[in-house]
Amino acid sequence: MTAPLVMDLVLARQMISGCGVEFANWQVVSSAKAAVSAAAGLDGPVALKSAAPDVVHKSDSGCVVLGVAGDEAVEKTYAEVTARAAAAGSATPERVLVETMTPGLAEIIIGLKRDETFGAVVLVGLGGIFTEVLEDFVLRLCPVTEPEALDMFKELRGFSVLAGARGKPHCDLDALARVAVSISRLGNDRDDILELDLNPVMAMEQGALAVDARVVLNGRGKHGAH
């Protein structure tokens, strides 16, 4: 039996972008100098995240740093992130993703899991405490239509967060639904994807941007492991 394989971050983002899902502006670099250059080309503060596929729990390992501004801070943070990735046992600790910080109205999780009995299942939920503690998420078999995806979001117990609770702006539900539809189609089309997580997707008044992605392949599907 082939062992599961974490898809390279760049390939994963390219695959998902090819389905119509938008990401915040990003670039993968392999040196502090390149990190400074990449950050200078992006608007405002940036996030630095280890792009090493063998660092699984990046946040827990201290390999994700948000809100970094200025050349000196970027250079220092690059050194810290790569050192932590190396300490976590990474074979490629120098690979770091530099990404624009994206404010949003809410953090959303949109994902995909392959069930041995039912096949590909798409998941939507609210990020943070809603998913981790309250287990507020909804599942459907792939693929789903846009109306079905909208209904999934409306079934969330925390839907009021998306619908403009307490006078706050409404999130762009149509944009979120389109992301869920795209991911569900990907799961239906590619039998080599075991898991896919967009966590988080930033919900905004207009549009939705993914800021992190993780894909696990079985390595034996019709599309292979890339």
Image (cartoon, grey):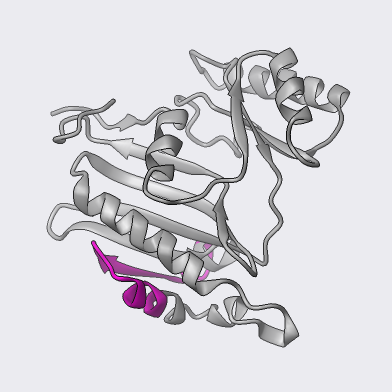
Residue 93 location (% of width, % of height): 57, 17
Q: How many labels does the image show?
A: 0
**Position of 71 compared to 27: left or right?**
right
Image position, residue 51 (x, y; %) = 54, 27
* Magenta segment includes 69: no
Residue 147 colored magenta? yes
Residue at x 67%, y 24% (from the top left corner):
81
Q: Which of 60 and 174 is in front in this view?
A: 174
Q: Which residue is drawn at 52% across and 37% down?
A: 57
Q: Magenta residues, as a range?
A: 132-152
Q: Where is residue 96 in the image (x, y as percent from the top left)?
A: 61, 24
Q: Position of residue 7 (x, y in %)?
A: 37, 31
> What residue do we see at 67% from left, 84% from top?
165
- Residue at the spot 22% in from the left edge and 35% down from the top edge: 218
Position of the C terminus, as image quadrant, is top left
Using the image, determine if residue 152 lies above or below residue 104: below
Q: Is residue 122 left or right of residue 133?
A: left
